[in-house]
Amino acid sequence: MPGGRLTQSERQQIALGLADSLPYAEIARRLQRPTSTITREVMRNGGPTGYRADLAHRATQQRTRRPRQAAAPGSQALAQPYGRDAEAVREYQEMLTTVFMTSGLPKMMARVLGCLYTTDTGRLTASELAQRLAVSPASISKAITFLEGLDLVRREPGEGRREAYVVDDDLWYQSMIRSARANDQFIEAARQGAGILGPGTPAATRLENAARFLDFVSEALIRAAEQGREVLHTRTTTTPNDTTEPHLDDRPSPDDAPSPDDAPSPDDAPSPDDAPSPDDGQAAAPAARVR
């Protein structure tokens, strides 16, 4: 897979791929580049609808000509636990940030969310976020307020008067439910409009169909989120051959195994008095011959 900076020819291929509505992964496959490289290139230069190959190439040349400045504290790759490659983690965090931006989050909000998701605790204070991202506390506060409104992070009391910002397993469920319920207002407005515009008219039918569609999708999404909620709480354990497997809390434990006291005793065996009598067999025989 080729490395180094993108060439002008490759940028033209990216522009053609975007014009053909190709996904980033397909463009990356054709150029033999990582998908993260294509995603970052597009988002840095106008997004999918505003990308221009010549402008992107010129902007890159201008950036490379600028004198390099000393790296800000906190912008360098931090030491990582579990023997992780610190530089690889930093690059992945940038790629995850780009993915969040592609989904519609503003850049600072995407950076904060990406930083939280790549920590093992999923919990950082404002000062820790500001240090890691090399931004002001005010920028962190604004981003957290925005993410809180989308149910993507929550606040927790920290040490002293500090607050900690957390992403946990259940936030995706809550965000999904909120997204489904966000359609309720339009559904209600569409049905009111159908009544005002006159049942059976083209405009009323359009609104009624939209309301029915969103109502169906919202209910299906809520049911799926309820059914899949336990997936968010699945834990993985490492096996002796360094692979992982889901850890289910409802597996039977050794304490659940039957004890010798549970074995049937001789007194539980059926007695001769319990055997069916000949009369019972004769009474049942005609019923067995009924077809």
Image (tube, rainbow, N blue to C red):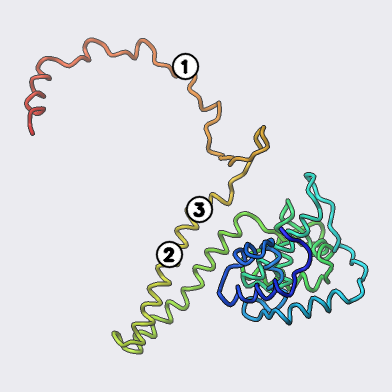
The kind of residue on which mark 1 rests is Asp
User: Residue under circle 1?
Assistant: 261
The kind of residue on which mark 3 rests is Gly
Between 94 and 236, the one nearer to me in the picture: 94
Q: Position of residue 271 (x, y in %)?
A: 26, 11
Distance Cα–Cα, label 1 vs label 2? 50 Å
Q: Residue furthest front?
A: 9
Marks 1,2: beta carbons within 8 A: no
Distance Cα–Cα, label 3 vs label 2? 14 Å
Q: Residue at x 56, y 39 (%)?
A: 249
User: Residue under circle 2?
Assistant: 219
Count neighbours of disc 3 (C-alpha within 10 A) and say few if under 14, some if 14 to 19, many if 20 or more.
few
Q: Earlier in the sequence, mark 3 or mark 2?
A: 2
Between 19 and 91, the one nearer to me in the picture: 19
User: Residue under circle 3?
Assistant: 228
Count neighbours of disc 1 (C-alpha within 10 A) and say few if under 14, some if 14 to 19, many if 20 or more.
few
Marks 3,2: beta carbons within 8 A: no
Q: Is residue 193 left or right of residue 73?
A: left
Image position of 257 with respect to 27: above or below:
above
Q: Earlier in the sequence, mark 3 or mark 1?
A: 3
Image position of 134 with respect to 280: above or below:
below
Q: Position of residue 152 (x, y in %)?
A: 64, 64
Quadrant of residue 91 within the rendered picture: bottom right
Split into 4 quadrants, where in the image is the C terminus? top left
